[in-house]
Image: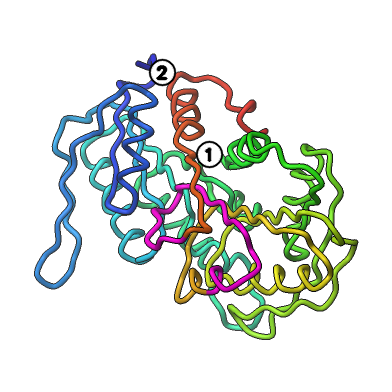
Amino acid sequence: MVDSWKTGPLRIFTGSANPALAQKICDALSVPLGQAKTGRFADGEIDVQIMENVRGCDCYVIQPTCPPVNENLMELLIMLDALRRASAGRITAVIPYYGYGRADRKPAPRVSITAKLVANLITSAGANRVITIDLHAAQIQGFFDIPMDHLYARPVVLDYVRERKMTNFIVVSPDMGSVERARSFAKRLDASLVIIDKRRPRPNVASVYNIIGSVEGKHCLIFDDMVDTAGTLTAVATAITERGAAGITTFCTHGVLSRDAVEKIEASPISELVLTDTIPLASKSAKIRTVTVAPLLAEAIKRNHGGHSISELFY
């Protein structure tokens, strides 16, 4: 059991997006999962009721905004509002996967910056703090006017790589935007880095133009924050296979896996796709492995609740 600090007793609740992850977090903390009832009116409106006293408590809501994104986001907002109106002492939104994170700027005239819009909604609904993992763009942290703990799944992934005792490997950044993430992995694995020059002629379509570095005879480790339609991953895998890659293992924190993503992965040269459980896996594949981020989130919650630093988690 964790000790409280300046806040009241610890309470952990979950929406319907990923209750399995919430239960793992509760098991790691040796606390029961809070009682909440979520229903639907006849027209589809979401109805939430907190089924226990939370007055003065330190409350955490586990809810990734994964598909169905709008349903899960609205459910999160309603749960936050319900806790606020129930006089919770402090409310933390634990959002393992932050949906709408791809629209973090205006790439064209007259478009919305939805990453900022969602940040405003979460704050207005009653959150006092946010905990998330591997944002699509790090600057989203600045969109919040409340404290945000931006964790990385890197420790979990590194443990997996080391347990496999891989040799003769090289780290590949699937695009220019992932260079910083890939470089951090390469540094910790003492490996070389290859960068892919990828362009997007239109949304969810990727084309590989150049490969900066040699992959000949190497087992390639590709790191990215998310896999949606798998267009980028499969295009990169095909390109580096043509350049002589000996094998390909990909690591993505968030397995959105929209449309025919699993079929693309099955037909690609990728030998293994490793995902975390920030998003529940809806499709099965012999190529897909899952590792859990529950201990990471549990430790962050424990330290926040106890008033301790979480700097050591930014590994």
N-terminal label among 1 and 2: 2
x 61%, y 55%: residue: 225
Q: Nearer the viewer, residue 285 or 66?
A: 285
Position of 113 compared to 281: left or right?
A: right
Position of 229 compared to 245: left or right?
A: left
Q: Which residue is mark 1?
A: 147
> Residue 278 in magenta?
yes
* Residue type of the residue flagged with mark 2: Lys
x 72%, y 70%: residue: 236
> Residue 273 in magenta?
yes
x 53%, y 19%: residue: 308
Give x and y (percent) for residue 257: 48, 66
* Residue type of the residue flagged with mark 1: Pro
Q: Are marks 1 and 2 in contact (CB under 8 Å)?
A: no
Q: Quadrant of the N terminus?
A: top left
Give x and y (percent) for residue 196: 80, 67
Q: Which residue is mark 2?
A: 6
x 14%, y 62%: residue: 40
Q: Give the farthest residue toward the left.
A: 42
Q: Work out whether 180 lies above or below 296.
A: below
Q: CA distance from mark 1 to mark 2?
A: 16 Å
Residue interval drawn in magenta? 264-285
Colouring rule applied to residues: rainbow
Quarter-wise, where is residue 45 in the image? bottom left
Q: Work out whether 10 lies above or below 63.
A: above
